[in-house]
Amino acid sequence: MPTETARATADGRRTRGQQTRRRLLEATVRVVGRDGPAGVTHRSVAAEAGLAKSLATYHFATIDELLVAALAEGTEQYARELADSLPAAATPAELAGYLAACFNEGRAEWLGSYELLLHAARRPALREAALTWSRWTAELARRYTDDPVAVDAFVSILDGAGLLALLSDDPIDAGRLARLFDRALRPPPRS
């Protein structure tokens, strides 16, 4: 049976390993945002994270593993932050305000995430992680509607608004996004 000291040592190593892994994943998104997916190497990510290259290769044997984990964990982290920050009963306008603020404040990270999403079209290993984003945004829409067309419209609006904002270097307009969300999620009554 392990001693208290052995358990504490193991827990400390595990915690440091988790922190190192997170630093590497955050660095990966920054490298992708700055240099594109082709700029991701164990060396470039380790340098960005301020770590030894050996730690990058220890935690992620291949670049695909690194890219998949960065995309999947980035989506999961963002979903957790949203759940912690925005009440489930938030209106579409409040959701739009929150999403626009996150995008506008974290533009470089969003650029990296979008680059990874697009890169998945050519890298089958990334596709499942990329589809996690669409499933997550669909779940957001289902807070407001069970209409599958409205859910698809919401996913398309969010992705399209983000891509257009990145292409134009303009911030996302929260009011415009709120109007689009409201139209998609609460369609006007039919006459």
Image: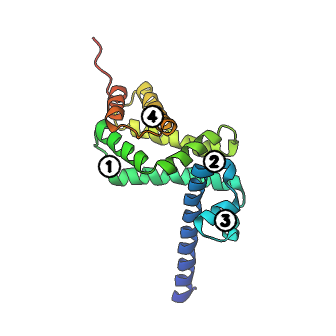
Question: What's the distance in space between the residues labelled 2 and 4, CA to CA?
Answer: 20 Å
| Circle 4 residue | 161
Identify the secondary structure beneath mark 3. helix
| Circle 1 residue | 86
Amino acid tagged 1:
Leu
Q: Nearer the viewer, residue 18 or 147?
A: 18
**Closer to viewer: mark 1 or mark 2:** 2
Q: Is residue 149 above or below residue 74?
A: above
Q: Is residue 18 above or below residue 25?
A: below
Mark 1 or mark 2, earlier in chain: 2
- Residue 36, labelled with which disc? 2
Question: What's the distance in space between the residues labelled 2 and 3, CA to CA?
Answer: 18 Å
Mark 2 or mark 4, earlier in chain: 2
Amino acid tagged 2:
Gly
**Closer to viewer: mark 1 or mark 3:** 3
- Residue 56, labelled with which disc? 3
Identify the secondary structure beneath mark 1. loop
Q: Position of residue 135 (x, y in %)?
A: 50, 40
Mark 1 or mark 3, earlier in chain: 3
Amino acid tagged 3:
Ala
Mark 4 or mark 3, earlier in chain: 3
Identify the secondary structure beneath mark 2. loop
Amino acid tagged 4:
Ala
Residue at 36% from the left image edge and 34% from the top image edge: 177
Residue at 66% from the left image edge and 60% from the top image edge: 44
Quarter of the view holding residue 3: bottom right
Question: What's the distance in space between the residues labelled 1 and 3, CA to CA?
Answer: 34 Å
| Image quadrant containing the N terminus | bottom right
Please state if 108 lies on the left or on the right of 115 as rendered.
left
